[in-house]
Amino acid sequence: MVTKNQIKLVKSLQQKKYRSQHGLFVVEGKKTVRELLQAGNQLFRLFVGNSEELANFKSAALVSEAELGQMSSLSNSGSVLGVFYKPTTLEVDDKDWVVALDAVRDPGNLGTIIRLCDWFGIKNLVCSMDTVDCYNPKVLQATMGSIARVNIVYVDLVDFLRNTPLPVYGAFINGDTVYGKKLPEKGILAMGNEANGISKTVESIISQRISIPQFGEQTTESLNVATASAILLNEIRRPF
Amino acid sequence: MVTKNQIKLVKSLQQKKYRSQHGLFVVEGKKTVRELLQAGNQLFRLFVGNSEELANFKSAALVSEAELGQMSSLSNSGSVLGVFYKPTTLEVDDKDWVVALDAVRDPGNLGTIIRLCDWFGIKNLVCSMDTVDCYNPKVLQATMGSIARVNIVYVDLVDFLRNTPLPVYGAFINGDTVYGKKLPEKGILAMGNEANGISKTVESIISQRISIPQFGEQTTESLNVATASAILLNEIRRPF
């Protein structure tokens, strides 16, 4: 059972404004819902579109496929939809590497970067206020459940970087090659916007400018921010 | 000027069947069109949506925005659309590393992998017959012009791998760690399908199973094939 008002509420959560207002976000797909539950995220409401899934998710309300479709933001959403309370973000600790994003706008890129942080055991992801919201439905879909295991904090990035005791590394198209660089045990890895890279104000706080060498013909196109993050996190974690 | 028949032809090229039949493919956006022209790709027809672009592309036909919209497969296509002859693929040479894809289905992933090959100077990309078509509009969009600089060949992958003189490396979730492995000067890097990885028949031909170690909590989710390709190509190219 779901009321019209509930459907309206869930639909409204596709917009960041209402996610902030209600402190809720929506997750679609049983895999991601299950991972969030396992990670201890607090559930507000759970809806399933068939009685088979009702057996898997005992606390769920059974709704029609049509009702589920009305609440969903995806064209191919599956039959499980969870509404969760936004978790309280923890303070960013300075015991390990932290990834910092400066105005990453593409939901797929943010989702991929969250998944990479999870893979490489990076517990903290710091985002500038103009980075896409991590509870955006497309971000959540791309994280494949990793959102449950990474502490994501939105901050004034300039302020944050000015006050961190960690050394700040930034990815630039014309930085020093990362190969052979002795990377410290901990630090900040700053990655920039898809079109413009790291902004001038953030650049002024960066202590080490690093780069992934290009081996093909020189072209104007840089690596995508998500693939560059993959390579740099691998460089940070590889043992030598 | 564009005739109704031409619009019909261009639209039909959104489907692989008609791309094969006519030996043509469509590229949208001036950046990619320009890169293909610079790389010497042979143009069939070029359409622009405003007279400003006509100054940049002399051989183009000026059409209305509505006509351009009818031919486009993208919601936000820009005002330049080129129809190119499919290039003749070259024989795959065995002088350097070659990337081999086994049933990669997602257009965005294939596009990203083509862009990565270009970045890392990998000249040859071999795809199984059931890998998504590289002239699919979404693939082309994700390559950001790199399609012009990588030789992409569709083959019977099992047959190809059986007959190559190169050592065949494959990415597996449970392979040997790639760190500290002395990778040869040349070889094949095989990457598998998004959901199922490398197929059993291809697996039987692989001489070296490699893996990117996981540092976070053990989860069922592997890295995405495009981000894994980024990391492994970086491992292949980094000097030590």
Image: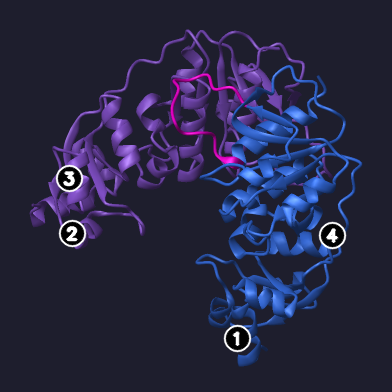
Chain colours: A purple, B blue
Identify the residue under disc 1.
B8
Q: Which residue is mark 3?
A: A54
Residue B208 visible in image: yes
Image location (x, y in percent) of residue A221: 71, 46
| Circle 1 or circle 4, nearest the eye | 1
Q: CA distance from mark 3 to mark 2?
A: 16 Å
Residue B224 is inside the magenta segment: yes
Magenta segment boundaries in residue numbering: B212-225
Identify the residue shown where x is 25% and y is 24%. Answer: A40
Q: Which residue corresponds to mark 4? A: B39
The quadrant where residue B187 appears: top right
Tag nearer the camera, 3 or 2: 3
Label 3 Cα crowd, 10 Å radius (few <14 / some 14-19 / many 20+): some
Q: Amino acid at mark 2?
A: Glu
B164 lies left or right of A46: right
Residue B215 forms part of the magenta stretch: yes
Q: Quadrant of the C terminus of chain A?
A: top right
- Residue in the image at 62% along x and 35% along y: B228
Identify the residue at image location x=53%, y=44%. B196
Residue type indicated by callout 3: Leu
Specify whether A137 is left or right of B113. left
Q: How far apart, in angstroms, are the residues tagged by discs 3 and 4?
A: 56 Å
* Residue at mark 1 to residue at mark 3: CA–CA distance: 48 Å
- The residue that mark 2 highlights is A67
